[in-house]
Amino acid sequence: MQTAVISSPFRLSTISTHSRIPSRNNASIRLPPIRMAHTETGPSVAVVGVTGAVGQEFLKVISDRNFPYRSIKMLASSRSAGKQLTFEDKEYVVEEMKDESFDGVDIALFSAGGGISKKMGPIAVEKGCIVVDNSSAFRMTEGVPLVIPEVNPEAMAHIKVGKRQGALIANPNCSTIICLMAVTPLHRHAKVKRMVVSTYQAASGAGAAAMEELELQTREVLAGKPPTCNIFSQQYAFNLFSHNAPVGENGYNEEEMKLVKETRKIWNCQEVQVTATCIRVPVMRAHAENVNLQFENPLDEDTARQILKEAAGIVVIDDRASNHFPTPLEVSSKDDVAVGRIRRDISLNGNYGLDIFVCGDQIRKGAALNAVQIAEKLL
Ligand SMILES: NC(=O)c1ccc[n+]([C@@H]2O[C@H](COP(=O)([O-])OP(=O)(O)OC[C@H]3O[C@@H](n4cnc5c(N)ncnc54)[C@H](OP(=O)(O)O)[C@@H]3O)[C@@H](O)[C@H]2O)c1
């Protein structure tokens, strides 16, 4: 299966043939998809930010899942206008995004940053386009569904393509998606009262340029040179630091507050108590998160493991004997979120607390895959 090619060390390399993590419980067997990508009846699609880390993954996911489309517009900034791009055996030219870009477009997948979404999202909606936005611009806006298809598809049930009625749907923050993919099945069973999240976040979460910087710094440090710091203000290679998002008055950074606020909106549960600490680690791709959970109702670890084994989009990697648990490398370019280290929280009496360790590819399930799954629900 062919996908997009734009020259950059990261963008050229992986042509992902599709991909679930081999499951030890056989829960992840996938039937081969029915090929239906190019079709006269499919929606016309625009990919905004197509040259970026998420934009490139949009194309891979569209191809891998055979998302049906009548046409695709490849949109980015003036910097990329005119670049050639091959996608599914067809040549495309990247266009500079303008107001007219959305004329006749049914679904626009946006990943060009919050400022661009704020400016161009409403213009696209005005033209009858359904915008699935990866930025934080509209996530907390009342009336804009914030959707993880496995968790709260009902939030967007009223929005369908074909009516030419524009709408906005927000993709949650990548850390929130990965966390709630694992925690929601447990929440449905025992109701989460309090959740403590500690993240170990990859370079890819900060875009293609951050991945390039991590690679460059690694080479520089190994060669005894001072590291180039353009994207991050401090050395990233062979180091880790508090997430680079701005820190608010309460001492939490924006990434941490997204976990708090988005969880409440997605679960429609204002009373859930959430705290988070977000850390950047020098991993190229895929986030890891430790999640400590306190429940209202008892939930023992065997039941939790079974619930997770049966959950859509989850694979359990929890082999205590060989000390094998989820790793970012194992989930890179994969659809499933991996969960392991499932254990009773011994600081609480009874079965009212669990610790779990979760890994997920945040460019894939944390961004592009989730958005394309949303788009599938619009058809
Ligand atoms: N990376 C992740 O894991 C992740 C996860 C969830 C959400 N997101 C969100 O997705 C968005 C993009 O992230 P990314 O990691 O893909 O960033 P990225 O690799 O830096 O890509 C940014 C993209 O936006 C385009 N762009 C910039 N200015 C533009 C403009 N004025 N008009 C049209 N396009 C413009 C860029 O085009 P040029 O090449 O022409 O500059 C590029 O295609 C951000 O809002 C981010 O928060 C990212």
Image (cartoon, rainbow, N blue to C red):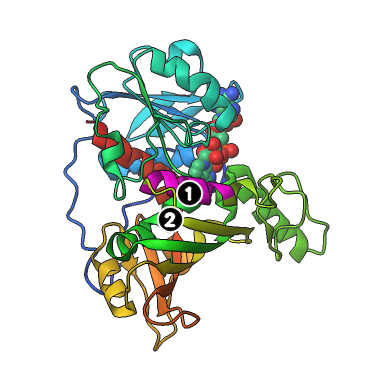
User: Dot 1, crowdedness within 10 Å: few (<14), some or many (≥20)?
Assistant: many
Q: Is 124 on the left-hand or right-hand side of 282?
A: left
User: Which quadrant of the frame does ligand 1 lie within?
Assistant: top right
Give the structural element (helix, strand or loop) at label 2.
helix
Spot the residue most to the bottom.
321
Question: Which residue is drawn at the image coordinates 36% and 41% (left, top)?
Answer: 147
Q: Amino acid at mark 1?
A: Cys
Residue 174: which disc? Answer: 1
Q: Residue at image x 55%, y 50%?
A: 204
Residue 228 x %, y %: 78, 50
Q: Viewer-proximal residue, 270 or 150?
A: 270
Please indicate, yes or no, whether residue 272 appears anywhere in the rendered image.
yes
Q: Are marks 1 and 2 in contact (CB under 8 Å)?
A: yes
- Mark 1 and mark 2: span between their CA atoms? 6 Å
Please state the horizontal and vertical placement of residue 135, each as a whole percent of the image: 51, 36
The foreground one among 283 and 305 is 305
Left or right: where 78 falls relative to 296 = right
Q: Is residue 260 magenta?
A: yes
Of residues 263 and 76, the one nearer the viewer is 263
Q: Is mark 2 within 8 Å of ligand 1?
A: no
Q: Is residue 110 above or below residue 297?
A: above
The residue under label 2 is which amino acid type?
Answer: Ile
Look at the numbered disc 1 and say if its residue's Cβ is closer than 8 Å to ligand 1. Answer: yes
Q: Is residue 137 left or right of residue 86?
A: right
Please give the count of numbered marks on the rendered protein: 2
Q: Is residue 201 visible?
A: no
Closest to the observer, 113 or 311: 311
Say whether residue 344 is magenta. Answer: no
What residue range appears in magenta? 257-267
Residue 272 x/y as whole percent = 44, 55
Mark drawn on residue 178? 2
